Image: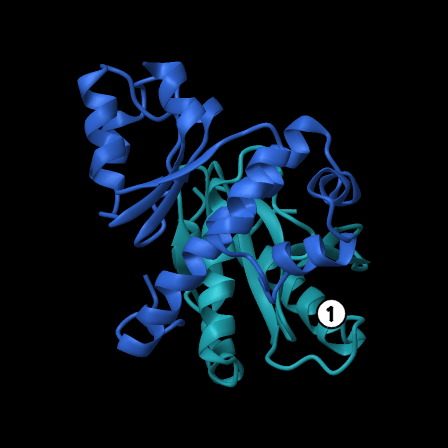
Chain colours: A blue, B cyan
Amino acid sequence: MEDFFGFTNPEFQEAYVEETFVAQVQHEIARIMKSKGISRAELARRMKVSAPLVTQMLGDEDANLTLRTVARIFDALGEKAAITPRESVLTFALETKSAVKRVMPIGWGCVVSKDQWSHDDELGRVQGGERADAAVAWVDAIRKVA
Amino acid sequence: MTKPWCQSLSDYAVVVESDNRRVVMAKGLAKEFEKVTLKDKAKLVSWMKIWTEDREGAISTQRFKSQDSFTDGKGRRVQIFAFKSFQARLYGFIRKIEGKETFLVTAADAAKKNDEADPAKLQRASKEAFKVLDAVGIR
C-alpha cells in the first residue's frame, strides 16, 4: 500500500495511535446511538449536559472525551464500557470457543461491542489481523458470550 | 477481457483496504496532501479505515459526508463524498470495482477556507471521477 500518510514517520505513528483510538470510540458511540435511535440531543438530555458539549465530544475537537465522560456516555446509552488489551479479547474468544463477529484491525486499537460477539466465522481473519495493544470491549458483550 | 482495475488505474494507489471495501487515492494528490497537518492525516486515515469496516452505515456525516452530484454528457452520474477532518477534505466517489466497494479519492483540499465545500474542488473531483470511469470501463 502507498504510504501517503507517513506511517514510517514516528511522529505520525504517535498521532495515529491516539487518533485511531479516539475515532474508534467515537464511532462505536455513534453506532450504538444509531442502532438505538438516540439523537445527540437525547444523549445530552440523558447525561444532563448541553447538546453542544455532546457535539464537542463526538466532533473533530473530541474535547472533553475522557475516560470519565466515555463511561457516562455508555451508561446513558444503556451500555457499559471497558478497556482491555486486545490479546485478552482474543484469548477470551478462543477459550469460550466464541469470537468476535467483527473486529476493526486498525493499527494499535480496536473496538468491540456486544452485538459483534456472536460467531466464530471470522476468527481466522481476526487472528491474522494487525496486532493491537489495546482494545475497548463492552462488558455486556463479554457477559453475553460467557 | 477487462484489465484488472489496478492496471487501468496506475495513477491510483490503495491506501486502506478491508474484506469488503477499499480506499484508493490519486498519486497526484500527494503534494496537496503534504500540506495536511499530521493530526488531520491521522484522523483521516482512521476514519477511512472505519469506513472500510462500517457495515451498518453508522459513520458520522461529520467524518464522511455526501456532497454534490455531477453528470457528464454520456448520461453518467457521480455523487461526490468527502472524508473530513477540521479543514482538510478528501473528495471522491464510490463504485463497486471487482466485487469490492471502492472509494476513489480524486481531489483534496488541505485547508478549506469556508464551511461549505469549494465548488471548484468538487468540480475537479467529478471531472477526475469521469476520467477514472472511462479508464476502468464502468459506468
User: Residue A50 vs residue B3: left or right?
Assistant: right
Residue A100, quarter of the rendered image: top left
Q: Which residue is mark 1?
A: B122
Amino acid type, label 1: Leu
Horizontal and vertical percent position of residue B103? 55, 53
Regarding residue A53, the answer to whether it shows in the image is yes
Question: Dot 1: what SS?
Answer: helix
Q: Is residue B86 above or below residue A65?
A: below
Horizontal and vertical percent position of residue B38? 44, 77
Q: Relative to the observer, which residue lies in front, B63 or A36?
A: A36
- On the rendered image, what quadrant is the C terminus of chain A found in? top left
User: Residue A129 vs residue A76: left or right?
Assistant: left
Q: Is residue B80 above or below residue B34?
A: above
Q: Relative to the observer, which residue lies in front, A64 or A113?
A: A64
Regarding residue A9, the answer to whether it shows in the image is no
Instruction: Residue at 50%, 50% (x, y): give it.
Output: A68
Horizontal and vertical percent position of residue B54? 53, 39
Instruction: Residue at 47%, 36% (x, y): give it.
Output: B99
